[in-house]
Image (cartoon, coloured by chain):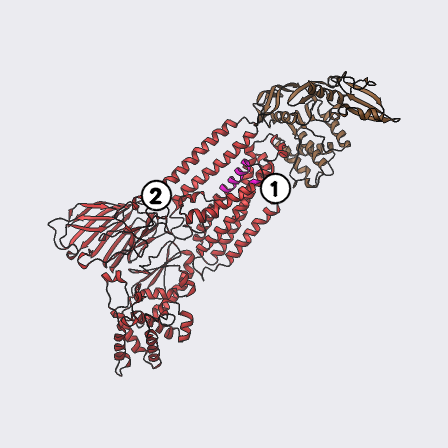
Chain colours: A red, B brown
């Protein structure tokens, strides 16, 4: 032991007396310090991701010195003939190498330990909840250290194998290849995700799944554990092979044991690799299965995969759901869906088509109390209805499964999952039976193109429905896109009336915050909490303003799901899904326009307005989008006290008022109707007719300003408002002397 | 005692570095002579447990080479090319070697280091960084490290290269004292290094052992091959220079000592060989045969 300690002291001294190695941790920590102190979590969202990204770059850069350290520490004495005297000493190479390795690791702690400790205290003071920062601290520390373990072992192996100075060049290439090249080209561009485990630090710059507070480490922890087990086994293999090679150069009595050790290490590493590859084999076969599925659409893009609008007579619908979901300890979900199918929907057909995600296995189907046959193909579920059935049908489907897909070409890779407390069961993934045969995914890319051939999820049609949902078995609360009515003993009950899709979201990192001023709650993450609170205050101000005069504004509990990661907002779903405003950190509205609460308010007032931009139709034919913008005009003028010029300068790029100021379109609006309408309102306000204007806007609001697109309009149509109609009502309400 | 029996060593390219070498080295100092490339370093490395022979059997103090880790417990070794960590002082370095040699008692180790530093005349430079040392100083520290822990067997490969004449003498005397109760193997191609101190000598050439014995035996190898003649300048220039061992001027004539199997000049007379002449005669005889 005294020999080992002496060797450790020597190695430590060799490192710290090298000016480069002495200086590098200082520089590293100064850069990190500078970055951390520039963070203001309360003023900017996405702090977690920002730290992750910055750390990824800095840590990846630090692997260069690690590589250099490993090569130098071996070449310094073990590789040089003039240091042969130390090989004649009664010491083993394992003693020398272990001292080099351990001291190297201790030295590398000088990079990460102070940096992450500074991060911890700085963020806790921001304040970000200490528990959340501690979790990130541990994650970063663990991943960093594992990375240093494997990189240092690789560098030492290279130095043992390659005698000449060319080893420095090879070490440099290994560093570049094992980090930037693998990340940017092989994984991100080529899509070879299974190489992730071979990345030297697994801090990915361009395709990282761990950079989110939710659905990051917690979601991938089993995969990471498998990957890290392999990495550690491979590290041991590299160290043992290094020792074997050195011992082959000098006679020793233990050489047979080293051969045996190397053999065992190969076996262990192979076993680790095998379990890692099995994971990918499963994913790959699931994708192959999907590509071979004839029920999936083939389309060139998500837009091209839009569902066609069915004829009225062919629209299968369900009028109500009562779903019970129980999560088992092994992440298996056991579900029972009780549904009502109106008579008009099945129309005496012998088969009722439904859609249920392929990961769920149907146990039994009951129609009006009788068990019936069903057929399953991919995501399609066809119920064979009894011949004697009539009228409204009550159907109960019992099913179970472990939902989880992996779409290699999608940014977030997984469109549904339920692992531990990490839950993402979007409505468009049919985690409960949907009416009609709808393809959840679509295929794109050339059939022969193995790399670009991919599967993506596609848009769905959701007829409005009454929904009741009971969820139990999760270690943390989950959130649904319908309202939660009760929560006790781990059982949550949700209800919604005439809702479209129902999505379930959950993560142990989600927290909720209730506004003290308005009936609204924010579901967000610890790092974004401070920022989200300021946004919620802004939202409350807008809410109060509009609720003071918009008579039919929804005033039930407003739920905002605000997260910087994990949720790919379906462009069709927009922000609003049923009763939940889903709002990812979005650079444009968070920073460029600085009106994120305005978007939430807009979603609460008008829904998603997917038809807002009107597909090239003439403005004269439909002015609903301009009318909804006038609500915001009123807000900026009345509540904020801004002039037209100030509105234009500050908010013209916000969707809410861009039609009024920033958007000039000669083709669809040659008569400048938008400008005319805003001038009308401005003039009326100047004349003291604000109340009349509000009355007019309320009238149109009651008639509908949701602006659904074609698909949404299938089930919830809305009539356009022509400019002539607007003018007519304007004259009647605002201009007439006896107006309201 | 070191026993070497039929030891051969071949490298990957197939060249023989040692070929069937057998010799027994008893207590005291043995000089291993041989020209550059004779296989001396290879033999030294085998004995120090740094390389394995391709065939043959070696024991060091009764321990076979199949137990090299045990052999390393009892040897001191100074390689031909010697480098140490420039960031350390000489004392720190010796302390490191002492610990590695199992000298765990700090007090005893310090005493040993002080003794060795004095022995190699480095006590006043011991606390200076190695990077400030001259080549000779480093060599002296190298010698000291090989003597740390008073090993039973000392193997030193060309230790005097880089030493000035005074240090060289000092070193030889030191080795002589050290070898009284121990086995010391000194490899060199400088005959003077072994002339005054070695009891035994072995000569290696092209991987083969040419002779073993005492210094007289080596000297005797030149018997009948060493000639001396007094020559004019013209005669001297006409002489085959490869035969000449030494020459000096005396009263306008050149007195030459030559090594030759035949009388090299009509005026040449056979003389008693010196040690170096015996060594050269042995090598030349081997070459000619």
Label 2 sits on residue:
A284
**Residue B105 visible here:** no
Residue A637 locus on image (x, y percent): 37, 75
Dot placed on the residue nearer the N-terminal end, 2 or 1? 1
Residue A679 locus on image (x, y percent): 35, 77
**Is residue A17 rendered to the left or right of residue A391?**
right
Nearer to us in this view, A696 or A394: A696
Q: Which chain hosts label 1?
A: A
Q: CA distance from mark 2 to mark 1?
A: 48 Å
Quadrant containing the C terminus of chain B in the rendered view: top right
Q: On residue A14, which mark appears?
A: 1
Q: Which residues are magenta?
A: A150-166
Q: On residue A323, which mark appears?
A: none
* Residue at the far bottom in the pictured view: A737
Q: Please tell me whether mark 2 or mark 1 is closer to you in this view.
A: 2
Q: Which chain hosts label 2?
A: A
The answer to whether residue B158 is above or below residue B6 is below
Label pair 2/1, CB-CB below 8 angstroms: no
Is A154 colored magenta in this rendering?
yes
Task: Identify the element where label 1 is drawn.
Answer: helix
The answer to whether residue A658 is above or below residue B188 is below
* Residue at the far top in the pictured view: B224
């Amino acid at each position: 032991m005294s020999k080992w300690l002496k060797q450790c002291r020597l190695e430590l001294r060799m490192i710290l007396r090298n000016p480069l190695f002495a200086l590098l941790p200082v520089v590293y920590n100064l850069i990190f310090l500078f970055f951390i102190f520039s963070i203001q979590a309360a003023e900017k969202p996405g702090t977690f991701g920002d730290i992750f990204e910055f750390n990824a770059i800095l840590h990846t850069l630090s692997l260069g010195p690690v590589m250099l350290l490993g090569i130098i520490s071996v070449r310094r004495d073990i590789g040089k003939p003039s240091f042969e005297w130390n090989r004649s000493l009664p010491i083993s190479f394992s003693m020398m190498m272990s001292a080099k390795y351990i001291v190297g690791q201790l030295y590398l702690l000088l990079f990460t330990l102070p940096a992450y400790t500074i991060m911890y205290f700085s963020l806790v003071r921001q304040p970000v909840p200490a528990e959340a920062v501690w979790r990130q601290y541990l994650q970063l520390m663990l991943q960093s250290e594992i990375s240093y373990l494997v990189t240092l072992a690789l560098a030492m192996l290279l130095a043992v194998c390659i005698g000449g100075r060319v080893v420095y060049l090879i070490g440099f290439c290994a560093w570049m290849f094992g980090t930037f090249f693998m990340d940017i080209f092989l994984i991100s561009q080529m899509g070879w995700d299974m190489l992730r485990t071979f990345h030297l630090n697994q801090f990915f710059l361009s395709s990282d799944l761990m950079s989110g507070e939710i659905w990051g480490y917690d979601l991938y922890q089993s995969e990471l554990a498998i990957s890290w087990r392999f990495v550690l086994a491979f590290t041991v293999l590299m160290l043992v092979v290094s020792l074997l090679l050195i011992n082959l150069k000098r006679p020793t009595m233990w050489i047979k044991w080293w051969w045996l050790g190397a053999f065992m290490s190969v076996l262990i590493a192979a076993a680790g690799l095998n379990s890692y590859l099995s994971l990918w084999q499963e994913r790959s076969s699931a994708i192959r299965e999907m590509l071979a599925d004839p029920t999936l659409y083939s389309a060139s893009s998500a837009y091209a995969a839009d569902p066609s609008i069915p004829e009225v007579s062919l629209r299968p619908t369900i009028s109500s759901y009562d779903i019970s979901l129980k999560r088992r300890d092994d992440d298996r979900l056991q579900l029972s869906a009780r549904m009502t199918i109106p008579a008009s929907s099945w129309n005496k057909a012998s088969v009722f088509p439904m859609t249920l995600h392929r990961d769920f296995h149907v146990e039994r189907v009951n129609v009006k109390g009788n068990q019936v046959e069903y057929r399953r193909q991919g995501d399609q579920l066809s119920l064979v209805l009894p011949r004697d059935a009539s009228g409204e049908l009550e159907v109960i489907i019992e099913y179970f499964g472990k939902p989880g897909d992996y779409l290699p070409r999608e940014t977030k890779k997984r469109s549904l999952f339920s692992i531990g407390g990490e839950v993402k069961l979007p409505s468009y993934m049919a985690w409960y039976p949907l009416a009609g045969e709808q393809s959840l995914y679509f295929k794109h890319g050339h059939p022969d193109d193995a790399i670009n051939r991919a599967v993506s999820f596609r848009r769905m049609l959701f007829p409005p429905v009454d929904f009741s949902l009971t969820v139990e078995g999760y270690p943390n609360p989950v959130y649904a896109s319908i309202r939660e009515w009760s929560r006790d003993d781990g059982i949550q009950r949700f209800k919604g009336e005439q809702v479209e899709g129902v999505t379930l979201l959950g993560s142990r990192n989600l927290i909720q915050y209730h506004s003290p001023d308005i009936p609204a709650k924010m579901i967000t993450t610890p790092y974004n909490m401070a920022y989200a609170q300021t946004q919620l205050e802004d939202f409350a101000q807008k809410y109060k303003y509009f609720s003071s005069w918009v008579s039919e504004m929804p005033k039930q509990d407003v739920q905002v799901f605000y997260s910087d990661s994990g949720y790919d907002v379906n462009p069709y779903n927009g922000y609003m899904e049923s009763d939940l405003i889903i709002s990812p950190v979005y650079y444009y509205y968070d920073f460029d326009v600085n009106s994120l609460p305005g978007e939430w308010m807009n979603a609460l007032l008008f829904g998603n307005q997917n038809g807002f931009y009107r597909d090239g139709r003439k403005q004269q034919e439909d002015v609903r989008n301009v009318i909804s913008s006038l609500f915001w005009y009123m807000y900026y003028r009345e509540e904020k006290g801004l002039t037209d010029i100030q509105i234009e300068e500050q908010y013209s790029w916000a969707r809410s008022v861009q039609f009024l100021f920033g958007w000039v379109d000669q083709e669809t609006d040659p008569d400048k109707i938008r400008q005319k309408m805003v001038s009308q309102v401005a003039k009326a306000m100047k004349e003291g007719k604000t109340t009349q204007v509000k009355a007019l806007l309320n009238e149109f609001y009651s008639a509908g300003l949701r602006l659904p697109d074609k698909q949404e309009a299938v089930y919830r149509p809305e009539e356009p408002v022509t400019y002539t109609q607007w003018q007519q009502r304007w004259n009647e309400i605002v201009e007439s002397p006896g107006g309201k | 005692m070191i026993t070497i029996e039929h030891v051969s060593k071949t490298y990957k390219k197939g060249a023989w570095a040692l070929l069937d070498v057998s010799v027994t080295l008893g207590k005291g100092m043995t000089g291993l002579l041989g020209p550059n490339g004779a296989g001396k370093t290879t033999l030294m490395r085998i004995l120090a447990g740094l390389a394995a022979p391709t065939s043959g059997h070696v024991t060091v103090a009764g321990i076979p080479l199949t137990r090299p880790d045990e052999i390393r417990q009892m040897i001191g070794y100074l390689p031909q090319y010697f480098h140490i960590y420039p960031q350390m002082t000489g004392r720190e370095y010796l302390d490191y070697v002492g610990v590695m040699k199992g000298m765990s008692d700090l007090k005893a180790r310090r005493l040993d280091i002080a003794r060795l530093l004095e022995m190699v005349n480095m006590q006043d430079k011991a606390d200076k960084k190695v990077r400030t040392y001259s080549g000779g100083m480093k060599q002296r520290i190298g010698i000291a490290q090989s003597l740390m822990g008073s090993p039973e067997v000392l193997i030193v490969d060309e230790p005097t290269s880089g030493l000035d004449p005074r240090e060289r003498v000092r070193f030889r005397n030191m080795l002589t004292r050290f070898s009284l109760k121990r086995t010391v193997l000194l490899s060199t191609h400088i005959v003077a290094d072994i002339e005054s101190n070695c009891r035994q000598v072995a000569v290696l050439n092209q991987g083969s052992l040419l002779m073993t014995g005492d210094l007289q035996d080596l000297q005797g190898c030149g018997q009948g091959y060493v000639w001396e003649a007094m020559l004019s300048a013209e005669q001297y220039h006409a002489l085959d220079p490869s035969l000449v061992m030494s020459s000096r001027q005396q009263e306008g004539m050149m007195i030459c000592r030559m090594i030759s199997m035949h009388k090299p000049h009509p005026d040449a007379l056979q003389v008693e060989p010196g040690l170096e002449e015996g060594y050269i005669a042995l090598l030349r005889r081997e070459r000619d045969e």
